[in-house]
Amino acid sequence: MDRIAITGGARLQGEIPISGAKNSAIKLMAASLLTEDTLRLTNMPRLADTRFLGKLLQRLGTEVVESEGEDGPETLLRTREIVSAIAPYDLVRQMRASFNVLGPLVARTGQAKVSLPGGCTIGARPVDLHLKVLETLGARIDLHEGYVYAQAPRGLSGAHIDFPFVSVGATEHAMLAAVLADGETTITNAACEPEMIDLANCLNAMGAKVSGAGTSAIRIQGVGRLHGATYAVMPDRIETGTYAVAAAMAGGEVRLTRTRSDFIQALIDKMVEAGVEVTPHNDGLTVRRNGALLKAVEVETGVYPGFATDLQAQFMALMTLADGESVIKENIFENRFMHAPELSRLGADISVQGGEARVRGVASLEGAQVMATDLRASVSLVIAGLAAHGETMVNRVYHLDRGFERLEEKLGACGANIRRIKGDGEGGED
Ligand code: UD1
């Protein structure tokens, strides 16, 4: 398995173009199952997760063609016919968002058999809300030997879906399933993440009638069929936030382009409070820190527009070198502090109790061997390594490859001393 070695201490200087959003791209890819025409996705990130989903879609009958377009990477997806409505365990297990093919399969063919994704390192992550969505839209759901069997032989019917709490994946699943349902679907307490708007815009470009995405109330008027479209994936707000924190951690000045600063406003507010200089511009933002000591600040994760849980680990890395004690509260996932003991191996002073971590800033970090546990946790170790004395070796980096495109190239271009050491094999679990 590959490893990443970082020799800390280099300040970052330069520009990093942000890729298309992983979390949006994989839902847009699933939307291609809803039409027999071609969906052309531009600004596609090339990641292990998009590859996994491409493999699954091919198994279901989608032709997947990747190419280099005028404006970067593109993927053409065409599902003339669903040849199999079965998503097997070995593919869903590798990437839990594959579960989102369930709704489109039922909507298009009236039935599907999709493996339950199982737990992952950041918690149990149940899919009860997803199943409730499909039941509310009229599907019959049975669970048998680790698989969900969904049936709606006469198609899905519009209905009112009221979520008991906000779920990104279940809101997206509801949109994906309801666009072809008979009649109107209304969703209340919907997730408001920018990815909801991206999915709705793409579905609308395909002929769907979705309104209200980006607010907590979404309305979908079902249509008889969807057609092909060309759609540009939104910029990755988590990649944007990650490099913003990396620049703050290493010091220097980095311009992040092809993105939007408003997507990460909650992070920017906290970075500014901590003493980092952030300047938004129309193509992204510039992050600057010139050696001044960081101030410890408190952070609490929340649903959008709150502080993203996917940026919590990175911000914790930043706080390890701040002046004072920072309290970081995780409100979305139950077990999302796996990076804390690894950061401690680099000399950080962190104690975790339940959903709260106390980070007492230290004068310096020291390079060590560390282990990546999940996608965002692993990038926090890279960020910490940028500022640590000596060499940090991040093991099991397949997690990083799931969500960060050409990470070492992008950081290296800004002067980071970072390199990949090739290993053998690939693994995946969440
Ligand atoms: C998505 C993102 C992930 C991000 C998360 C929160 C993708 C591929 N992943 O994950 O990067 O961290 O949003 O912003 O887009 N829950 C249930 N039952 C369900 C569904 C969810 O109990 O049926 C719980 C989860 O365990 C979690 C909370 O709801 O505690 C929020 O999860 P959710 O918003 O659904 O996150 P994901 O869509 O899995």
Image (tube, rainbow, N blue to C red):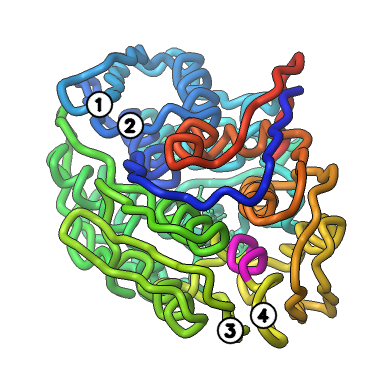
CB contact under 8 Å: marks 4 and 3? no
Q: Which residues are magenta?
A: 313-318
> Percent position (x, y) of residue 72?
25, 26
Q: Secondary structure at mark 1?
A: strand
Seen at 67% across and 31% down, the residue is: 398
Q: Are the residues at dot 1 and dot 2 in contact (C-beta closer than 8 Å)?
A: yes
Q: Amino acid at mark 4?
A: Lys
Residue drawn where x is 54% and y is 25% of the image: 52
Give residue 44's mark. Answer: 2
- How far apart marks 4 and 2 lie (CA) works out to 33 Å
Q: Residue 91 lies in magenta, yes or no?
A: no
Please report the residue visible at 66 percent of the width from the left and 64 percent of the height from the top.
317
Residue in the picture at 47% in, 50% down: 12
Could you say where residue 21 lies in the image, as x and y percent from the top left? 38, 44
> Does residue 2 appear anywhere in the picture?
yes
Residue 155 in view here = no
Residue located beneath label 3 in the image? 295
